[in-house]
Image (cartoon, grey):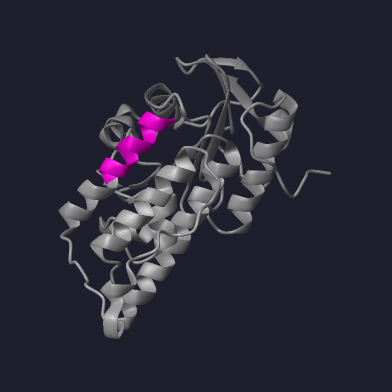
Amino acid sequence: MQPESISHGAVKREEEHRSDICAVGRWIHDRGYAAATDGNISVRLGPDRILMTPTCMSKGMMTPDDLVIIDLEGRRIAGVRKPSSEFGMHLLIYRSRPDVNAICHGHPPTATGYAAAGIALDKPILCELVIGLGSIPVARYGTPGTAELSAALEPLVHSHDAILMANHGVVTYGLDLLTAFLRLETTEHFARVALVTELLGKQVLLSGGDVEKLTAVRARYAAGAQPVPMPSDDPTSYADGATERVTLTRRELESLIDEAVRRDRSIR
């Protein structure tokens, strides 16, 4: 019987990592984040060993023995199946981000729709998105399973934890597998909310001041601090219920969020 929950943490026995990947594979499949044999998942076992899902197999039907271990050159060193054809994308992320220990790639329908439309999820309409992921850019198209895909992702990997891949899907990553999966789920949730606002014909963006507060909270989370209340404001600034709203261009917002992310990296 496979577990229906997993715990946070990157330091586990290999057997636990195998079980966790199978559990996350079922979640991804059951939620419709990957159809048929699409998607792939991996966990860093050590400095030069990556445990990952096999190619041509439903993520909802895997067993621990189906998983494959590769080295940082992509060579299979354990397992009877072939690794995912997109192992190059995983290796790029692991090489670029020493803080990353797990990666999830899927095709959640709404977020993938944004990727296919070439539209980034970078508007500050949800506070949770700003805190959790900052912004989610779109990488240019690269053929799956080739060096083109890695080259398209490379400029964005350092400063983002979730990336839309044009005409392809979504990749998310983090300190451990549960974090990587939750970021995939958050990306799809935000895409659905964003789509609803667009269908309604109205988006109310958070102000520049709101975004600054949220990026401060994001930095606290990144530093491992306990959640803290949002900074209080000077009551006099809200006389008669009025607040000053600041309008940012997309470039200004991306710059603000990217700066917060860079500060996060320096704290880790």
Q: Which residues are magenta?
A: 258-268
Occupied quadrant, residue 12: top right
Give the camera-side residue of 225 and 176.
225
Residue 100 % position (x, y): 48, 30
Report the predominant secondary structure element of the magenta stretch. helix
Q: Is residue 202 above or below residue 20?
A: below
Residue drawn at (22%, 54%) of the image: 253
Give the camera-side residue of 232 and 144.
232
Q: Does residue 80 appear left or right of residue 149 in this picture?
A: right
Residue 115 visible somewhere in the drawing? no
Residue 10 % position (x, y): 61, 30
Q: Is residue 93 above or below residue 29?
A: above
- Whether the magenta-drawn stretch holds residue 259 is answered as yes
Q: Is residue 250 above or below residue 38?
A: below
- Whether the magenta-drawn stretch holds residue 68 is answered as no
Q: Does residue 227 appear left or right of residue 129 in this picture?
A: right
